Image (cartoon, helix red, strand yellow):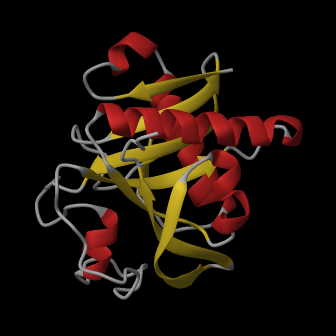
Amino acid sequence: MQTTTLSFANMHNHGELMANLFRARRQSFILRNQWELPEALGMEYDQYDTPASRWIAVHDGLQILAGIRLTPTTARCGIYSYMIRDAQNGLLDTIPDDLLNFEAPVHPDIWESSRVFVAQDTPMAIRRRVHALLITEMTRSARDLGAKLVLGIIPSNWPRWASRCGLEIAAAGRVLEFDGYDSQCVSINLAERLH
């Protein structure tokens, strides 16, 4: 099992891994969750999958076990910026505009995590390890990209596992319900602690 941070600049070095990540997202979000999202060639994608983003893959060879997308809050693509900000600005029908307790920031030190998933066929016996690898690689990659804070919408049960992951997470909005799943906007502090 390994982790890889993918980008438009390095995807050619990883064979089918990037395509498999988008295929796994389709399996998770369109087939399992029944969300109405764009798809083509058996892959799920949206307006935030641009060269500005990065994709974290936890994988065994080319088999995707889990994934997450990182997008800078400074990103722009037509009328879109990043998912949380666009929802707050009323551009997304499926996410309420009151998801965040403050104005969505636009700053080079702040990135958004989105499209977080664990593949359905990832064995239960290794899921905890897969989660840990996903969070570790997301944190490392975000820091490497200059992030001091990451905003994301995650399952609302995050207080139960946040301390296990060693993350400094704070609620950043109210609990939201998406097709039976309770989620919440959070901020993840990545600023290095001085000891």
Q: Nearer the viewer, residue 104 or 83?
A: 104
Question: Which residue corresponds to the image point at 36% horizontal and 39% vertical from the top-left?
Answer: 142
- In percent of width and height, residue 92 lies at 32, 77
Task: Report whether 162 appears left or right of 25.
Answer: right
- In percent of width and height, residue 54 lies at 34, 37
What is the tally of numbered marks visible in this picture? 0
Q: In this view, does 67 lie above or below 37?
A: above
Q: Please indicate, yes or no, whether residue 4 appears anywhere in the rendered image.
A: yes
Question: Which residue corresponds to the image point at 43% horizontal and 79% vertical from the top-left?
Answer: 94
Q: Please indicate, yes or no, whether residue 43 appears anywhere in the rendered image.
A: no
Task: Report whether 76 appears left or right of 60.
Answer: left
Question: Which residue corresponds to the image point at 64% horizontal and 47% vertical from the top-left?
Answer: 165
> Residue 98 is drawn in which quadrant?
bottom left
Q: In this view, does 48 lie above or below 41?
A: below
Q: Is residue 122 above or below residue 168?
A: above
Q: Which of 30 and 183 is in front in this view?
A: 183
Most distant residue in the top direction: 13
- In percent of width and height, residue 86 lies at 26, 72
Most distant residue in the right direction: 125
Task: Report whether 89 appears left or right of 151.
Answer: left
